Amino acid sequence: MTRPTTFGLRPDLAVIATHVKFGSRVLDIGCGEGELMEALQSQMGCDARGMEIDPEAVEKCVARGLSAVQGDANRDLADYPDHAFDYAVLSQTLQTAERPDLMLDELLRIGRKAFVSFPNFAHWRMRASLMWNGRMPVTRHLPVSWYETQNIHHVTVTDFVRLLADKGVRVEQSWFFSGERELGATGANWRAEYAVYLLSR
Amino acid sequence: MATLLASTSQSLLLPQPLALDSGQALDGVTIAYETYGELAGDKANAILVFHALTGDQHVASPHPITGKPGWWDRMVGPGKPIDTDRFHVICANVIGGCMGSTGPASPGPDGKPWGMRFPVITLRDMVRAQVALLDALGIARLHAVVGGSMGGMLALSLAANFPERAARVLAIATSWRHSAQNIAFHEVGRQAIMADPNWREGDYYGAGKGPDKGLAVARMAAHITYLSEAGLTDKFGRRLQDREAKSFGFDADFQVESYLRHQGIAFTDRFDANSYLYITRAMDYFDLAEEHGAKGKASLADAFAGATARFCLVSFDTDWLYPTAEARAVVHALNAAAAPVSFVELSAPHGHDSFLLEVPALDRVVSGFLG
């Protein structure tokens, strides 16, 4: 089943945009040039704020009339008060965090709920690449070589679920994708290129 | 030849005495201001620009004494980031200043210049005076208030004290309070002025000669704080001024010395030494958290508790006078107050003065934020 393109967003962002409560307060961590924030504001009546490390991307957000703060999620999330937002969003960024486990704590401190999406390093293409070539995989979803990738903490669906269990974090909902295609949960750790989770404490 | 931007020079005599933070009241306050661009029928397109310590109301029109272009000519004008084809831009000389608004050189109640009898004022007093100007102009809510350096502090002060008066607040290269280092540099400048025998306890107006040497030294010291070390090295290095070798004397051997001396002397042509004392004092007294927190429990977030505006803060990576950490503290407080805020640290080589100079990214942020 191919999900219809929603608000012109990447599939993981579209999931998020269609599952936030109308009119909620959202912090998008690693907001880039503000595609998700714009959709949340214009389509879902949200009060969306962003954090982004790249000053040029922040500049583009500001030029779009969005509220974005230049900052490093490893450090500057501490500036936000507890439960300041209904949702904290971390899309495709967890694997770049210095300490993904601590960042997860921060997400659920700042937001009552958190959306987290990440690439699944146990996808069969990855496994095959390691198994047959003995080399760190370079795939369509993770196209950067090991020495220049920003992904410093490779994580699998199973690893992530285990971390959630260790931390006592509740999974409200989860979605799995291969390219643009949404998959069922069965065999997700083999089949999914990336996953989206809605979490709460 | 470039066409000159049409501006209107005006001044307003405040109908009421201005209540000051010191507890005193200042009667007969005049505010000199310039406007650019048409005010819309609904008066909703006004942008108030606050100037910095030694700036003035001539933001985009030639300075009447030096003849130089306005201090933010590159930012304000038709088709520029603060677009006078769309916005009605107002810039007023701060009280305590020397370009037409009431200050220490203005006549006091006895008709003689105030001199040091002028009351010590605060940045909030300057803001109160300009809010009175907005009242007189019938502008209930500004499209935006904009300022850099001291102008940014005034913009933040307006947002904190008169939250309903501006829909957007853009504060550039600025801080929420003067640090010990900021105060220290200002004190050097003030002591230089007061050590000049021509200062005469501030009563130099009829004497034919003011404390120009002291004021020039104050400007030289301050000017260093506006530039980055790399910027100075880049511009001057250790290059000598019009000579082949060191003179083994105390002439301006180095280009940087010659440059600073020139900056100091040129400044005395256009600025009143007592105004410099009063305005630097006002900046040193500035602490938004102290103003708004409960006694002994100063919280910057309290200052913005009633904020209704969108905020944008901009810092520069080479600005060591008001470094990025100060802007971040404001962002932190605005987050705590749940105010919508944007923040970006821009990369520019010129230090604190970057906000006045060619930084294309700043232009994009300003025009984008103003909408």
Image (cartoon, grey):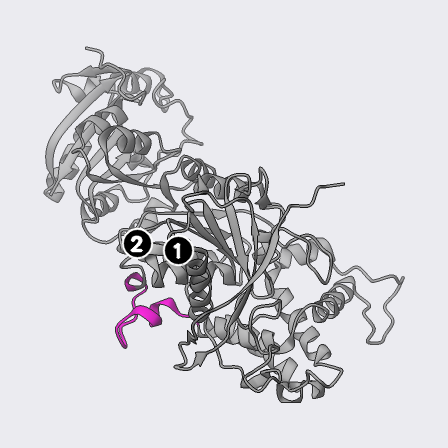
CA neighbours of label 1 inside 10 A, class few (<14), some (14 to 19), many (20+): many
The answer to whether the residues at label 2 and label 1 have Cβ atoms under 8 Å apart is yes
Where does the image place residue B177, in percent across and percent down from the top left? 42, 67
> The magenta stretch spans which residues?
B286-302
Q: Is residue B287 covered in magenta?
A: yes
Q: Residues within 10 Å of mark 2 (few under 14, many from 20)?
A: some
Residue to which mark 1 is pinned: B328
- Relative depth, front residue between B110 and B59: B110
In this orientation, which residue lies closer to the viewer: B257 or B160?
B160
The extreme top residue here reads A1
Q: Is residue A186 visible?
A: yes
Residue B349: x and y, percent?
A: 61, 50
State the SS at label 1.
helix
- Give left or right: position of A78 versus B277: left
Residue type, numbered disc 1:
Arg
Question: What residue appears at the point 51 percent right and 39 percent down from the top-left corner?
Answer: B86
Residue B248 sits inside the magenta stretch: no
Tell me residue B345's x, y (percent): 47, 48
